[in-house]
Image: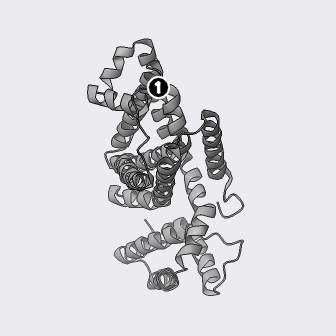
Amino acid sequence: MRQSQFEQRYQPQWRRLEQGLAALEKKQRPKNVDLSRFTDDYQDLCHQLALSRERGYSLVLQDYLNDLMLRAHRQLYRHRAPLMPRLAAFLRGDFPRAVRAMWRWHLISALAFLLSAGLVAAMILHDPELVHTVVDGNGVSDLENMYHPDLRDSSDRNRADDLMMFGYYIYNNVGIAFRTFAGGVLFGIGSLVVMLFNGSFLGAAAAHLTLVGAGQPFYTFVIAHGAPELTAIVLAGGAGLRLGWSLVAPGSWRRVDALRRAARETLPVMYGVFLLLVLAAMIEAFWSSRELDAQIKYTVGGISWALLYFYLLFAGRHGSE
C-alpha cells in the first residue's frame, strides 16, 4: 500500500483521536466529543505506527503518528478516574450501548436459546418420555425434589443458607457465561452449542415440571432472577459468536489481530454480563426462594424483565453512540 493510500484510509481515525486528545488535555470532556472509541483508536494507532516504520513511509508521517501515540498513551495511563464514577458511566451508557452495537450477534444467540427451548418443550409435552433424552434420571429426580410441592422442603432454609447459595449461584453462573463466551474461539461453534444445550435443558425442565404438577413453583422461582440471568447468558453467547466471526471472516486483518479487535469490542459486554450475574445471584438467593403469593412473584418478575429491557434498549441514547 502506498503512503498516500495509507494516509487516506486512516486519516478519519487519526482526526477522531486528535479531537479526543484535545478534549482530554483540557481536563474537560465536552459533550460533543465522542470518546467511546478512544481506547480502540489508540491501539489501532500503535499498529499503524508499526506498519509505517516497517514499510518505510516518510519520517514526517512516522513522527506525526509517534507524537499522537505518546499523547494518547499519557492520557490513558496517567489520568485514571476514580472507580465509582467510571462504574456509574459504564452502567449509565457504555454497557447498554455496547450491547446495542452487537445486537445482531445477541439476536442469533437468543434465537438459538429460545428455539431450542421451545422445540424441546413442545416435544416433551407431546411425549413425556423424551425428557430422558435431555436430562438423565438423577437430573429428573433432582428437578422434582427441588420444585414439586409434595417433595420439596424449604422450611429449614435460613439467612446463612441464602448467603451460601448467593456465592454458589455466582460461581455457577459465571462459569456458564465464561464457557459460553470462550466457546466462541472455536469459530463460534462452541458458543452456539452451549446456547442450544442450555435452551434445550430449560425447555425440558419447564415441560417436565409442568406435566408432573410442579409448573407454578418452578415458574415463580425463576421468573424474577431469570431476567438478568438468562439475559446475561444470551449476551455472553452473542459476544462469543462475535469472537468466532472474527476468525471466520477476519477481513484484511490477520486472524490473531482480528480476534484481538473483537475481544476488545466484546469486553464491555462481558463486564456487564458479570454485573448482571451478580444481580441474578442476589435475587435468586434472597428473593426467589421466598414463599410468597404467586401473583406477587409474577408481578415482580414481569417488572424485572420490563425494566431490564427498557434499560438495555434506551439507556445512554443521549450520549455518544
Nearer the observer, 155 or 243: 155
Say left or right for 249 vs 74: left
Q: Which residue is mark 1?
A: 214
Q: How is the image coloured?
A: one colour
Q: Quadrant of the C terminus?
A: bottom right
Where is residue 276? Give x, y as percent: 51, 54
Res 298 → quadrant: top right
Where is residue 145? Give x, y as percent: 37, 31
Nearer the observer, 54 or 187: 187
Is residue 4 at all visible to an observer of this figure? no
Q: Amino acid at mark 1?
A: Ala
Label 1 neighbourhood size at 10 Å, few (<14), some (14-19), many (20+)?
many
Q: Residue furthest top?
A: 126
Nearer the observer, 209 or 318: 209
Which residue is found at the position 54% from the left and 71% from the top?
38
Where is residue 50? Give x, y as percent: 38, 75
Res 261 → quadrant: bottom left
Nearer the observer, 68 or 7: 68
SS under mark 1: loop
Which residue is found at the position 50% from the left and 71% from the top?
39
Is residue 51 at all visible to an observer of this figure? yes
Q: How many marks?
A: 1
Say left or right for 171 vs 239: left
Q: Is 153 drawn above or below residue 245 in the view shown?
A: above
Where is residue 139? Give x, y as percent: 31, 31
Which residue is found at the position 35% from the left and 21% from the top?
131
Q: Quadrant of the N terminus?
A: bottom left
